[in-house]
Image (tube, helix red, strand yellow):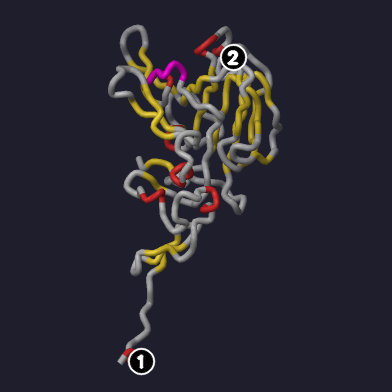
Amino acid sequence: MLQNQSPRLYTMNSFSARYYNSDLSIWLSVDPLSDKYPNLSPYTYCANNPVRLVDPDGRIIGDPLKNMKVRRNSISNTFGNVRKNKDGTTRSHQGVDYYAATGTPVYSISYGIVVNMVANDSKEGYGISVTIQHLADDNTPLHDDNGNNIYSFYAHLSKINVKVGDVVYENTSIIGETGTSGNATGMTGEDQHLHFEIRTKLNCHKGLEGRLNPNDFVDSKFEIDPNNIGKVRMIQSQQEAPSQAQKNRPCD
């Protein structure tokens, strides 16, 4: 009876890092980074939480600092129209300010190449900065959902350890050190910080055009603190949750 049945053709969906058989509801190979997450089955996806997490290409995205904290835990130091002018109108903040004492090592969040740097402190704007274009494993540009290139931008530095054309790697390449350059000049104590952006353009102007929310890309993520108006709190970090979820970013 079975010998007379036509062979079954199964549907396989490519998730870049591996294939998924939607008929059998199984992965056809293990997660390529499963050795980094021994507490989870190598056949799981998004730490068994696909409603909240996605994993578009199987790669890890890290943090620009080893210890992540939003400056003063203030929502005004996160991304978006989160700041106010004196007349009460809102204005945008193009990235996230992560607290870091001057001299703290800064890391590339992912594999890429240094495409721009400003080594002289003008005492205004972003000051000393580095821009990295991120790449896929085959060295083609990494894109967002709309096909735009992905760049990470690191500002208010005190020192740069790389040059244009250097290849950098996630959480291993120290690209520089934090500082108080640019319009962060004179900041002390808890106001010292790394200004960090995710961009879809090499050069951006004022406003949010050409920028994405860094919270959707880095490992350590923050949310509005429901118990503290105007503040944020950490919801996921590499240090607190060493699991497969670290390499996934939340759905919009």
Answer whether residue 156 is visible to the viewer in this image: yes
- Decide: is 13 above or below 243: below
Q: Main secondary structure of the magenta part?
A: helix
- Image mark for residue 180: 2
Confirm whether the magenta stretch covers residue 162: no
Whole-number angstrom distance, CA of label 1 to CA of label 2: 75 Å
| Residue on which the image places disc 1 | 3
Residue 138, position in %: x, y? Answer: 61, 54
Q: Quadrant of residue 19?
A: bottom left
Q: Which residues are magenta?
A: 71-76
Q: Determine the secondary structure under disc 2.
A: loop
Residue 40, position in %: x, y? Answer: 44, 51
> Which residue corresponds to the image point at 40% horizontal and 47% vertical from the top-left?
54
> Which residue corresponds to the image point at 47% horizontal and 23% vertical from the top-left?
69
> Which residue corresponds to the image point at 58% horizontal and 46% vertical from the top-left?
135
Q: Determine the secondary structure under disc 1.
A: helix
Label 2 environment density (alpha carbons within 10 Å; few <14, some 14–19, many ≥20): many
> Which residue corresponds to the image point at 49% horizontal and 52% vertical from the top-left?
57
Question: Residue 211 or 166: which is nearer the viewer?
Answer: 166
Q: Where, quadrant-wise, is the N terminus in this rendering?
A: bottom left
Q: Amino acid at mark 1?
A: Gln
Label 1 environment density (alpha carbons within 10 Å; few <14, some 14–19, many ≥20): few
- Decide: is 14 above or below 152: below
Q: Is there CB contact under 8 Å for labels 1 and 2?
A: no
Answer whether residue 212 is visible to the viewer in this image: no
- Classify residue 238 as left or right of residue 138: left
Q: Amino acid at mark 2?
A: Thr
Mark 1 or mark 2: whose residue is earlier in sequence: 1
